[in-house]
Image: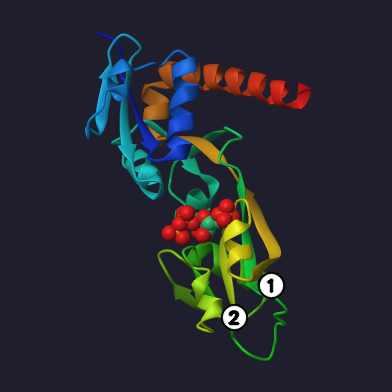
Amino acid sequence: MKTMLNVALPKGRLGENVLRIFEEAGYNCPAIHEPGRKLIFENEETGVRYFWVKPSDVSIYVERGAADIGVAGKDILLEYEPDVYELFDLDIGKCRMAVAACKGFRDNTERTLRVATKFPNIACNYYSKKGRDIDIIKLNGSIEIAPVLKMSDVIVDIVETGTTLLENNLEPIETIIPISARLISNKVSYKFKHKEITALERKIEQLCGETKAERKDS
Ligand code: PRP
């Protein structure tokens, strides 16, 4: 019997792109394209079982071994620091983690800086390296509103096109780190399904390399 690879895919636009890459690499799964609300799909022929999960949960499924591999944003890996192997940078889902504030904001270093964010761990690490005192305000979305309503001085958040900042009269102040999607693996699976995982990794790497070269040429 064929060894099946359990793959956690992030629901949404990034996941659709990831699925396209996996299918092009030879891990197609016709059932996943059928309309409906199912979340688990498999194709015994190609040896894959896909799960759609919330993007921020991918690393939990992989860390606990419910999925052998998955694709997660570097933001999630930095925030939750899951005990997984980071195998490969897919070079898609690119954006950056940045500090932003209302236009014209000046930091008064004598006062504690109020930071609104969905990423408290990333924000704490960043400011502790700078030796800056902060007060974290943990939010779950629409972070850009916090400084506008004077609840925070700055935000630490994902910036992709910059449109959300612009339309809310905010501006980026500092880039913390560039972000992209990463192929991750459960540590035990990497040992026991080594042949299957490395074969997949090689195919995906080759495909992404070709796409990168095409992008450079055009
Ligand atoms: C993310 C992020 C910003 C926005 C940035 O939010 O938190 O709000 O995208 O994108 P832009 O630079 O292209 O405007 P998301 O869409 O995940 O929604 P959320 O605020 O509810 O988390």
Residue 73 drawn at (x, y percent): 51, 45
Q: Is residue 143 above or below residue 188?
A: below
Q: What element does badge 2 sit on?
A: loop
Q: Residue furthest bottom?
A: 110
Q: Is residue 139 above or below residue 176?
A: below
Q: Write the residue at 45% across / 12% down.
A: 26
Q: Earlier in the sequence, mark 1 or mark 2?
A: 1
Q: Is residue 148 left or right of residue 130?
A: left
**Amino acid, disc 1:** Lys
Residue 141 location in percent, x, y? Answer: 43, 63
**Quarter-wise, where is residue 64 in the image?**
top left
Q: Residue at x 72, y 82 (%)?
A: 106
**Kind of residue at badge 2:** Asp
Q: Give residue 13's quadrant in the image.
A: top left
Residue 28 placement (x, y as % from top left): 39, 16
* Residue placed under numbered mark 2 in the picture: 153
Q: Residues within 10 Å of mark 2 (few under 14, many from 20)?
A: many
Q: Residue furthest right?
A: 217
Q: Secondary structure at mark 1?
A: helix
Specify the farthest residue to the front.
167
Comparing marks 1 and 2, which lies closer to the viewer?
A: 2
Q: Which residue is mark 1?
A: 130
The residue closer to the viewer here, 168 or 101, is 168
User: x and y percent of residue 42 in the render?
Assistant: 27, 20
For the N terminus, the quadrant is top left
Tell me how the rendering is colored: rainbow
**Closest to the observer: 46 or 36?**
36
Residue 71 can be seen in this image: no
